[in-house]
Amino acid sequence: MNLFLLEGAAFFLYFASSIMLIKGIKEKRHQKTALKLASIAALTHLSAILLQAWEQQTINFGFFHTASIISVIIVFLLLISSFSKPVEKLGIALFPLAAFMLALDYAFPDLTPIQTEYSLAMNTHILSSIVAFCLLTIAAFQALLLAIQNNQLKSHNPGRLMLSFPPLQAMESLLFQMISTGVLFLSISLVSGFIFIDDLFAQHLAHKTILSILAWLTFSALLLGKKLYGWRGRTAIRWTLYGFLTLLLAYFGSKFVLEILLNKV
C-alpha cells in the first residue's frame, strides 16, 4: 500500500478521534467512537512505519522518524491504559500531537538511514528508553491537566471538560502510577546503557546520559518525597514537569543539534 495514503489516513483519523473526544465531553457515546478511530489511526500509523522499515530494510532512527515512532507508542499506551484507567481524555492533546509528528516525518524524511544491526542487549536499552519516555510523556500531560483542574476547582468555576475528569485524588494517584512505571523503565535503560555502550563521548551520548540521570534523580526524588513527606498537588506537578523537560532535552536536545542544526549522524 502507498506510504502516503497510510500516513494521510492516520493523520486525519487522529484529528477525527480528538474531535470526537471533545464531543464526548457532552455525550459519552462519542467517546467509544473516538477510541475506535484512534485505534485505527494508531494501527495505520504503525503500518506506515513498518512499511517504511521494510522498504529501507532497516529501522530509521532519524530525528523526526524517531519522534513519529515514539508518538504512536504513546497512543497505544494511552489506548491500553484507557481500559482500566480514566486517561482517554488525554487523547484530546496526544492524538493531534501524534498526527503532527507523523506529518513532520513525512515532510522531512531522513534519506540516509543508518544501517546498523543491534544486539539483543542494545535493543533492550533502546526499547526501555523509548517506553520510559512514552510513559513519562503521558505523566507530563497528566500533570498539566491536573494543574488546570486544580486551578479551576479553586476558582469555583470549573469548565465542562474539567468536571468530566475523575476527582483530584484519583488523578494524582494515576500520575504517580505512570511515573513509577516510567522510572522503572528509565532505570533499566540507564543500567543497560552503562553496561553495553562502549564509549559515551565518541557516540555523542554524554549529554544524553547526564540529562537522563538528572531526570531519573528528579522523578525518583518526587516518588521518595511522596512516600516520606506526602508531596502532592503543585509540588508533584512541578517536579513532574521539571523531570520531563530534562528527559526531553536528553532524548531530543542533542539529537536535534547533531542531526538538524549540525547535520551530523
Image (tube, rainbow, N blue to C red):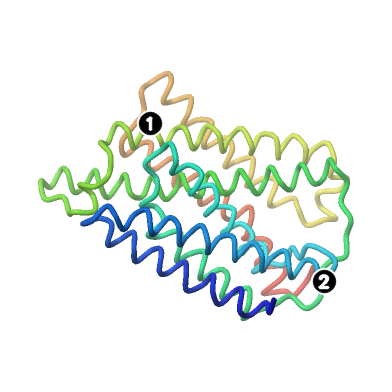
Q: Name the amino acid, label 2.
A: Gln
**Is the N terminus in the top left, top right, bottom left or bottom right quadrant?**
bottom right
- Label 1 SS: helix
Q: Which residue is mark 2?
A: 56
**In the rendering, at what x and y percent does residue 40 appear?**
53, 62
Left or right: residue 191 compared with residue 183: right
Which is nearer the eye, 58 or 260?
58
- Label 2 SS: helix
Is the residue under label 2 in contact with that under label 1 (CB below 8 Å)?
no
Q: Which residue is mark 1?
A: 173
Left or right: residue 95 compared with residue 232: right
Tell which residue pokes out farthest to the left in this image.
156
- Give the mark nearer the N terminus: 1 vs 2: 2
**In the rendering, at what x and y percent does residue 173 appear?**
38, 31
Give the foreground label among 1 and 2. Answer: 2
Q: Residues within 10 Å of mark 2 (few under 14, many from 20)?
A: some
Q: Name the amino acid, label 1.
A: Ser
Considering only vertical position in the picture, is 108 above or below 23? below
Give the Cα separation between the discs numbered 1 and 2: 43 Å
Label at residue 114: none
Which is nearer the eye, 97 or 238?
97
Residue at the (31%, 39%) spot, across then down: 234
**In the rendering, at what x and y percent does residue 246 appear?**
55, 49
Residue at the (52%, 36%) spot, across then down: 219
